Image (cartoon, helix red, strand yellow):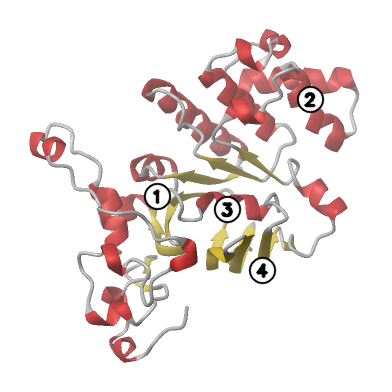
Amino acid sequence: MTPRPLLEISALHVTYATSGGEVVAVRGLDLDVAPGEKVGLAGESGCGKSTLALALLRLLPATAKVEGRIAFDGEDLLQANWGRLRAVRWAGASIVFQGAMHSLNAVQRIGDQIAEPILLHDKTSKAEAHRRVGELLQQVGLPPARAKAYPHELSGGMRQRVMIAMALACRPKLIMADEPTTALDVMIQAQILRLIEQLVADQGISLIMISHDLAVLAETCDRLAVMYAGRIVEQGPASEVFSRPRHPYAKALSAAFPTIGDPSSRRHPSGLAGDPPDPSELPAGCSFHPRCPDRMDQCLEIDPVLWPAGPERLSACLLSAPEDVATTEVSR
């Protein structure tokens, strides 16, 4: 019997109210995460990845309207009251933001910041909370004495390790890591990625890793979902989506990485011209068709849904659609 997913996202829509009208940032998204599974979310900036992560714990601003269903451990968080939602944050699911310096309190010692959610959720003594802080710092490769440091006294990699320690503080079942290595140099990036991978594996934690780097996600995650214009356009085993993508957008992301030892790929990298569409001005039909090298006439009219594209593979492209779909318009 297949276990129930830890996280079930169904028909999720996120709309921002702006001075120019409503802007839809996430459009009818479906995604499940199993207990202990590592899922990667890939895509360019502006595709809705961070909005999705913030929506999961209802951290979006008041100008955002969220519709659909977000079930965590069987409980719909969109229907939960604020008291229940507060209990889920940190203890059930936590998040590692991409800018550690922006997430840490500059005038508070890091030990006190890590201890805060422990004191709130575990109802323990300050002495026990700070003992736990020392353990967490050791888990992320920092000496317990660093608990007395202020954020500005730590390097970027150290601050990111502190954020990971905070995310682990209340032993959550799910961690979301939103571009956790963007501001770090490549050596520190590799260390942080190995650290996250090891910690979630050792503790059986589910992981949602958000990045524009398919190579990072292919190495770190079990499954990969590629987002474009607020939707998932491809999904499947991470290594296969990276090495054998089905959707033209996923192919472009994968091809953007130069091949080591191949001078031609370095001098003439395969990229993708243009930018993702403005969410307030999405094109008719497939939202990717203005940039797609494989577009057909039907792409200007039909907005594809996710269709089977091989074992455990899904692709929102007419190239993967059943034969009778070409004559049927799919509503957006």
> Which of the two discs, 3 and 1, labels the residue nearer the N terminus?
1
Q: Which residue is mark 2?
A: 115
Asked whether the viewer can see residue 149, the reply is: yes
Residue 175 position in % (x across, y down): 61, 42
Residue drawn at (30%, 64%) of the image: 247
> Which corner quadrant holds the N terminus?
bottom right
First in residue order: circle 1 vs circle 2: 1
Please name whichever residue, 294 or 164, is drawn nearer the observer in this view of the structure.
294
- What is the distance, in whole Å, between disc 3 and disc 1 at their CAs? 13 Å
Instruction: Give the residue pinned by disc 1.
Output: 44
Sequence order check, earlier mark of 2 and 3: 3
Residue under label 4, please give it: 67
Badge 2: residue crowd in 10 Å (few <14, some 14–19, many ≥20)? many
Q: Secondary structure at mark 1?
A: loop
Instruction: Tell me the mark number nearer the camera, choosing from 2 and 3.
Output: 3
The residue type indicated by label 3 comes to Thr
User: Quick one: label 2 or label 4, which is nearer the N terminus?
Assistant: 4
Picture layout, residue 266 above or below residue 295:
above
Residue ID at (15%, 35%): 266
Position of residue 138 measured from the top left corner of the image (x, y, whole percent): 63, 17
- Left or right position of 85 against 33: right
What is the spatial separation of the Cα atoms under label 2 and label 3, in whole angstroms? Answer: 27 Å
Residue type of the residue flagged with mark 1: Glu
- Disc 3 marks which residue? 51
Dot 3 falls on a residue whose secondary structure is helix
Distance from label 1 to label 4 (Cα)?
Answer: 24 Å
